[in-house]
Image (cartoon, rainbow, N blue to C red):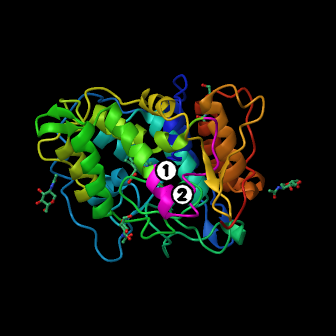
Amino acid sequence: MRSVSLLLLVVSPPFVAVNAWKNARNALSTPSDIQDGQTGVLMVLPPRQTDTGTKRIPDVDHPFIAPGPNDQRGPCPAMNTLANHGYISRNGITTFEEIILGSQEAFNLNRDMISGMVAGNMLTRGNPFVNKISIGGVSPIVPPLPGQIDGPETQGIAKHGRVEGDASMTRSDVHIGDNRNFNQTLWNTDLEILAQFGDDGPDGPATVFNLQTLTELVRQNLESDQLLDPEVYPTLKSGPLALKSLKFAVPIRRLNIVFGTTQQATKHIITSFFMNQTFPENWFRAASPVLGSPIPAQIAAALPEWVPGHNDENGVFVADPQAPAPFNISPGCANYWDVLTNAIPGPLANVTGVFKQNVDLLTGILFNGSGCAEPIAPAGPTNT
Ligand code: HEM
Ligand SMILES: *[C@@H]1O[C@H](CO)[C@@H](O)[C@H](O)[C@H]1NC(C)=O
Ligand SMILES: *[C@@H]1O[C@H](CO)[C@@H](O)[C@H](O)[C@H]1NC(C)=O
Ligand SMILES: *[C@@H]1O[C@H](CO)[C@@H](O)[C@H](O)[C@H]1NC(C)=O
Ligand SMILES: *[C@@H]1O[C@H](CO)[C@@H](O)[C@H](O)[C@H]1NC(C)=O
């Protein structure tokens, strides 16, 4: 979804604005909605930030503080970094609005793009009734969905299967090892590939991640996973592109754009985010809001032999089904079909009250970004 593929969201024309924000905030004072003992919290799409220029990040109010034993951290270096600096809650339990505001402030991400990423993760791994999501695993602060319609626990983004997938750059496959925390062995292999294919830069020869490096990273991750992990399943069921490449090329490219005035994904900068989960020293956010990138499609095109799919019980690779018409008109629409059909739990289609309002907002954001002509109701399996 990052889903892997959610990262690819094509951003639609400007939507909503400050009035909607104010109205919805007023709505918060209306009588509360209690379901299964939980109090619903209405989500409100935050406005685009008005200050969209570059600035030094972190500011004095957001120092690095290492997480404590009860703080949640997980597979996303960006979310971990935001939490380590208090741009989202340091305990790793955050909300729709907090991630959007923190990502706008710290990374200067385009509001609609980050909204789509949060929407997909909140619908698959958060509790969209109480507006809480763990950036790691199960937490006592995030209750199961009312009526336990997706099983007895809300899992958090580290849970394998819907968004979290195999063949990551710095996290092991769930069937091999720890799919949640940084793995130094994997990172060392990534750096070997960088040393072969990278561009020259301020850190020395072959130290800047370029298209060829990213392509080789994808290829080698997929190849070694196919050997090591008989159950390899690169990502959730997916559309017509090699979503695996979307998965990590987009963030790196985004880091590349975001990361500072040099606009280079240097070894030092990327190491700071991936390994130390902190902003590099003297780091400035991008000079204008950051959108998507053509890099994932270029990587996918460079690796035509890798189509989305998984191994069956005999270890034989099976390609995923393609999105049916009319959802096969574009990669973005096919991805939307995939996420709604295979990843977002079906019972979310039938919720009520504040729960329904929140689900409608989140699925509406995904639809707006999809490029599809018609929406789809959530229909994915539960308790997975
Ligand atoms: C702010 C922009 C974001 C950036 C730059 C970013 C970056 C990344 C990167 C680089 C990875 C790959 C790590 C690896 O391969 O070892 C990743 C993985 C992941 N991210 Fe993010 N991310 C962003 C936003 C989010 C958001 C908002 C969520 C959910 C709330 C999220 C959830 C995930 C998950 C679940 C994974 C694991 C996918 C896998 O299996 O590899 N990300 N992210
Ligand atoms: C780290 O990755 C290596 C290489 O795949 C693997 O052998 C090891 O088990 C992983 N460690 C953990 C803790 O997952
Ligand atoms: C990562 O943290 C270690 C330990 O604090 C430090 O020595 C190293 O310079 C850091 N590296 C980067 C790239 O931030
Ligand atoms: C949602 O409700 C409709 C109408 O009651 C029902 O047909 C459908 O099976 C329900 N879907 C889910 C996923 O519970
Ligand atoms: C989707 O886009 C339409 C048209 O721009 C807008 O009116 C609507 O508020 C958007 N919905 C969401 C959930 O963002």
Q: Position of residue 229 (x, y in %)?
A: 51, 63
Task: State the residue position of label 1.
Answer: 96
| Label number found at residue 249 | none
**Residue under the point 72% across and 59% down:** 381
Pick the quarter of the image with the C terminus: bottom right
Mark 2 surroundings: few (<14), some (14-19) or many (≥20) residues within 10 A: many
SS of the residue at dot 1?
helix
| Label number found at residue 131 | 2
Q: Main secondary structure of the magenta part?
A: loop
- Classify residue 314 by image quadrant: bottom right
Q: Is 136 displayed left or right of 131 in the figure?
A: left
Q: Position of residue 225 (x, y in %)?
A: 48, 57
User: Amino acid type of disc 2?
Assistant: Asn
Q: Is residue 350 visible?
A: yes
Q: Is 380 displayed left or right of 370 in the figure?
A: right
User: Amino acid type of disc 1?
Assistant: Phe
Q: Position of residue 198 (x, y in %)?
A: 24, 36
Q: Is 270 displayed left or right of 201 in the figure?
A: right
Mark 1 surroundings: few (<14), some (14-19) or many (≥20) residues within 10 A: many
Q: Position of residue 156 (x, y in %)?
A: 51, 64
SS of the residue at dot 2?
loop
Q: Is residue 5 visible?
A: no
What stretch of residues is rendered in magenta?
Answer: 222-240
Residue 232 included in the magenta stretch of the image: yes
Q: Locate ligand 5 by image quadrant.
A: top right
